[in-house]
Image (tube, helix red, strand yellow):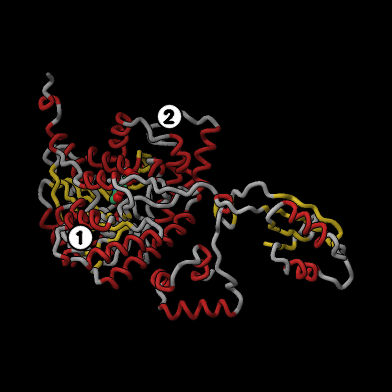
Amino acid sequence: MIDYEKVLSPVATGLKPSGIRKFFDLLDSMHDVVGLTVGQPDFVTPWHIREAAIESLQAGKTYYTSNAGIPQLREEIAKYLDRRFDLKYSGDEVLVTVGGSEAIDLAIRACVTPGDEVIIPTPCFVCYEPIVRLAGGIPVILETRYEDKFKVNPEMLKKAITQKTKMIVLAYPNNPTGAIMTKEELEDIAALVRDTNIVILSDEIYAELTFGRRHVSIATLPDMRERTIIASGFSKAYAMTGWRMGYIAAPCEIFAQILKIHQYCIMCAPTTSQFAAIEAVKNGDEDIERMKEEYDRRRRYLLKNFADMGIECFEPEGAFYAYPNIGKFGLSSEEFCQRLLNEKRCAIVPGTAFGDDGEGFARISYAYSIKHIDQALERIEAFIKTL
Amino acid sequence: MDKLLQLLDENATYTTKQLSAMLDMTEDDIKSAIAKYEREGVILAYKTIIDWDKTDREFVNAIIEVKITPKHDFGFDKVAEKLSNYPEVRSLYLMSGVYDLAVIIEGRTIRDIAYFVTHKLSILEDVQSCSTHFVLRTYKDKGITYGPAVKDERGNCL
Ligand SMILES: Cc1ncc(COP(=O)(O)O)c(C=O)c1O
């Protein structure tokens, strides 16, 4: 009999299965659950974008594109980054990827070698740590705090930086907290890395979804462009999760290495999706505004209701999540969410799915209609009354 | 556009409480803004969009193109006013182009509509001609696409 212990990579077997998977499987098997769990827009991709994909198929565009993506798309992304965020890249420094997910993977693998440390502020999206481990790197978890509004605290970051630090992950606007970082706050981070060989991996997938002020990319600060890799994508801003469209923008020295990995592993991002992306990035600004306005209303509605229910919640300024503090109810985050599901048929994600420091919190997605949010809130309110 | 109107246009069932949270206005401000709109006739009514084809209700809709004889010192408004009084007239528009009034009418049967055309509409003095088109199926109305209810099939992907 084959001995799988000998077959499988200990790095792979050593990866933590995403704890939340079990919770989601249970959720999927239950009926009548009102959930606020999904991390993707409830909008359908705008029709003109879908139509562009359909037209490309009708025209028989079913080939591979060049490795880095359709040149027109790369040019358009570069123009878009300049128009929306004042980021200066040429089309030659933009690589089209399979979602922001591949962009993150490529950025980490292009830089991290065994023994390198990667500082990962938590709570955060789940993929950075496992990818760092797969590259042989050492994830260094930097917990962010409620009292810092879940921003990276420069003092704490300074202490976390060592001789071995290769990369710092910055993921703002943040999933799951909805925190953002302002230009001034980013400047404090930039000051710590400016004279080093540390690279910033800036995951800006929620850049378009900020409420009140525009997102600022750390790459726009002096001397930061040369040490920043931007990972972003179409999933959140254009409601295009299923298309698997993302991109990397990076200075050409880094870009060249990233392109090789992409070329050998993926060849090219899906062609039909690339044609949709051209339409999105050229003519989608208004769609973004429309959806953002809707998210903002829901955000306000959620916050108002939390306040009325006596649930403490830091005000999220980006993405489409709220991250209320549920610690005072005397249950662990997992117990709270498990019991809420069992007893009231309402699902939210325990903060611990996003890092150990998520204890005491839960992530609530507001990528749902107000009516749906209302139903969920009623159940949450009924539940906390029983505690 | 006024945000409050925009929201009510999207969903007339929003409560004052929901509107107040979404728009960052007090509930009292919402109430008085709505009252003002109602008073001024900006907000005329609150209705529900129902796909009657999914019920056992029998009905038939038709669009009637009406040409009016042009006359001195006589507007289309008079004919329109008269037609508006009929409850079976669901919508009524003055049109540019080859005809003048578009009448959208609802009846229980085709016969009801035929009766309206022959006994009410075509006998009006100023009506020159009318041409009736029956609606076979509604695909979209008032910005809402008709069809099966949409299920939330988004995966929990993390
Ligand atoms: C912070 C963050 N980065 C990246 C991604 C990956 O998104 P995609 O691969 O769909 O572009 C997600 C998805 O949830 C996310 O929340």
Q: Secondary structure at mark 1?
A: loop
| Residue under pointer 1 | A361
Residue drawn at the location 76% of the way across and 66% of the way down: B83
- Report x, y in % for residue B53: 58, 50
Read off the residue under disc 2.
Answer: A64
Task: State the quadrant of the C terminus of chain A.
Answer: bottom left
Which kind of residue does numbered mark 1 sit on?
A: Phe
Q: CA distance from mark 2 to mark 1?
A: 44 Å
Label 2 or label 1, whichever lies nearer to me, is: 1
Locate residue B11 relative to residue A215 in the image: left or right. Answer: right
- A321 lies left or right of B118: left
Please, is residue A275 above or below residue A182 in the view?
above
Q: Secondary structure at mark 2?
A: loop
Q: Is residue A163 visible?
A: yes
Q: As shown in the figure, which amino acid type bears the numbered disc 2?
A: Tyr
Both marks 2 and 1 on one chain: yes
In the figure, is residue A55 to the left or right of A165?
right
Is A293 or A166 nearer to us in this picture? A293
Residue A285, above or below B27: above
Residue furthest right in the image: B72
| Residue in view at x 32 percent, y 48 percent | A31
Asked if residue A83 lies left or right of residue B64, the reply is left
Q: What chain is tagged by disc 1?
A: A
